Image (tube, rainbow, N blue to C red):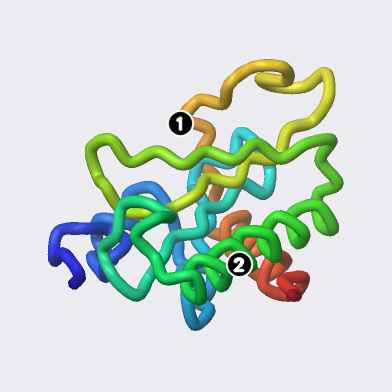
Amino acid sequence: MKKKECQYCGNIEAMEKFGRLAFETETSLIIVFKDQSHKGRMIVAYKKDHVAELGDLSKEDRDAFIADVVACANAIKKVYNPNRINYGAYGDTLGHLHFHLVPKYENEFEWGGTFQMNTGNYASDEEINEVARLIKENFHY
């Protein structure tokens, strides 16, 4: 069941505060995080229902969701060539299954440490649209 107030359950106004929908798969929302302190930062959110944990999904849905996370990570790698991608799955307050995919670059911002949620480094609409376009073009299973 979806929750009306949840940004990943269709509350676009709430999602627009931090991200922009790039595209959807059968299982996931692929979202550009507006704070692009790490160029190419994305969110992959489960879209079928309001679930909190990977263990709440059927094997089929879990496999499809993880395939989307991997395909998005591979697109980030191809487009932005990071040294590493950090994965964050938080949900203490929201409780909706989603992963932050944060490309990290050696000897650059936050290398060797945990990424911040919001640094205030918000991309322009043009930059966000370009990230969305590039990730969508390079998203393959």
Q: Residue 117 has which mark?
A: 1
Q: At x 57% / y 52%, what residue is drawn?
A: 42
Three-letter amino acid code at the position of disc 2: Asp
Q: Position of residue 100 (x, y in %)?
A: 52, 45
Identify the image quadrant of the N terminus: bottom left
- Residue 82, x across and y down, in percent: 81, 40
Indicate which label's residue lies in the foreground, 1 or 2. 2
Q: Quadrant of residue 19?
A: bottom left
- Say if 33 sits above or below 134 in the image: above
What secondary structure is found at the residue carrying circle 1?
loop
Does 2 appear above or below 88?
A: below
Picture layout, residue 8 above or below residue 96: below
Quadrant in which residue 47 is drawn? bottom left
Q: Which mark is residue 68?
A: 2
Rendered residue at 86%/46% (across/down): 81
The image position of residue 68, as x and y in percent, is 60, 67
Of callouts 1 and 2, the N-terminal one = 2
Q: CA distance from mark 1 to mark 2?
A: 21 Å
In which quadrant will I find the C terminus?
bottom right
